[in-house]
Every structure is written in C-alpha cells, then in structure tokens.
Amino acid sequence: MGFITLKNERLLADLKDLEQSHEIKRKETAKALEDLETARNSAFLQLKKTEELFKYLTWKQQETINSRFLTGSPTLEEIRRHSITRFPAASYTFPVLEKTAVVPGPARALGRIHTIRKNSVTFGLIQKRAEELSGAIGKALTAFEYQYKSACRALFPFGVFSRLRRKIRRLLGRSYFSWQDMSRLRDLGMAAGFVFKMAEAPVF
C-alpha cells in the first residue's frame, strides 16, 4: 500500500512539474506569435511605400513587369491593394489546459500528462514556425529596403525636381515612367512580392 501511495505521489509531482513547464512554453509560444504579428504589420507598413511608385505605372507597364515575376508571385496590383487596405490580425487558438479543482487520481493524472505532452509538442512546432517566419520577413524587408532606396536614387536623382519633371511629363500626355525605368521597378516589385509572400504565409 505504501509503495502505491509513494508511486502516486511521484506521479502527481511529475504532473505538477509538467503543468509549470506547459505554462512557460505557452507563454513563449504566445510571445513568438506576438513578435510575428509585429513583423507582419511592419512588413505591410513598409510595402505602403510602393504605392507612390506603382500607381504611376500604365496598365501595359504593369503587365510587362508582372510577366517577369515567378509563377505564384503576387502582382503589383495585389501588393498595392493589400498594403493599403489590409493589416493581418491575430487569430491563433492555443491548446487550453484546464486547471483541476481537486487532485486527480492516477488514471486521470496519466491522461492529463498525455495531454500536456501533446500540447507541448504543438507549442514547439508553432513557436519554431513563428520564429522562422519572423526571421524570413526581416531578411525580405532588408532586401526590399535596399531595392527601394536604390530605385528612388535612380528614378529621382534630383529629388523633388525629378518628381516634378515626371509630373510634367504626365501633363503632356506621356507616361510618368519611361520604359527604361522598368528594370528598376521590376526589381523593386520582385522584392516587394517576396515580402508580401512571407508576411502572408500561414503559421500552420
């Protein structure tokens, strides 16, 4: 009888330790998802910069740039539309571990231990995926920032005077951007598209 009592006490002690580690893992996973949400919102805010450039492209120029993108990549219009109107909202459901009001018996304790271990595996997968996506978004944004600054320097070498010149071109019935500008805008579009895909990628 004493052996059984001791075994049950150890089982309950293990259960208590697992419950504590479960809560720690849940909080770590929630933090990883919060960081991912911050990275996603930052990505969409940065993509708003493309609005001031892509909106001046003619339909034919947009089609020319889109045709150079890889299959499955978002179009310039998709990037513009989503960066203007959409910010991702958190919608994650965590496995819930209900607290017991009474000390469970051995059978119930074993079932609870199984649930905790299953949840912990799920938390680990979610946390790893969230951290991978946050890192990928960060790298994609770095590349995008480089392409954006490079494009602006090339397209507007004299700042507001270059922009004014282009606006005058439009008033005279010509396109804001010339066909010689397309390679710069294509590279920017590709970088923006990669940011978009990473920010839109599901966690699971």
Image: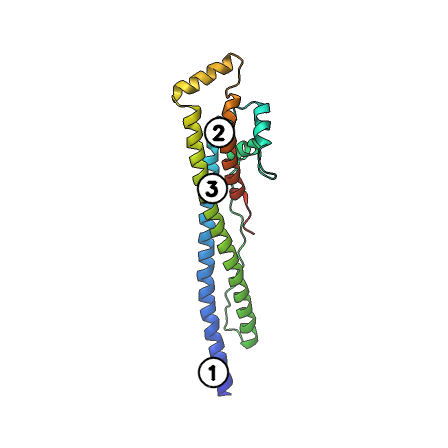
The answer to whether the residue labelled 2 contacts the one labelled 3, judged by CB atoms less than 8 Å apart, is no
Instruction: Give the secondary structure at mark 2.
Output: helix
How packed mark 1 is, by other alpha carbons closer than 10 Å (few <14, some 14-19, many 20 or more), is: few
Tag in front: 1 or 2: 2
Is 147 drawn above or below residue 121 in the view shown? above
Q: Does residue 65 lie above or below 120 as drawn?
A: above
Mark 2 and mark 3: Cα distance apart in space: 17 Å
User: Which residue is found at the position 50% from the left and 71% from the top?
Assistant: 102
Observer-nearest of 50 and 3: 50
Precedes in sequence: disc 3 or disc 1: 1
| Disc on the earlier residue, 1 or 2 | 1
List the residue tagged with mark 3: 140
| Quadrant of the rendered image containing residue 138 | top left
Judging by the rendered image, the residue that carries numbered circle 2 is 184
Q: Is residue 149 visible?
A: yes
Residue denoted by label 1: 6
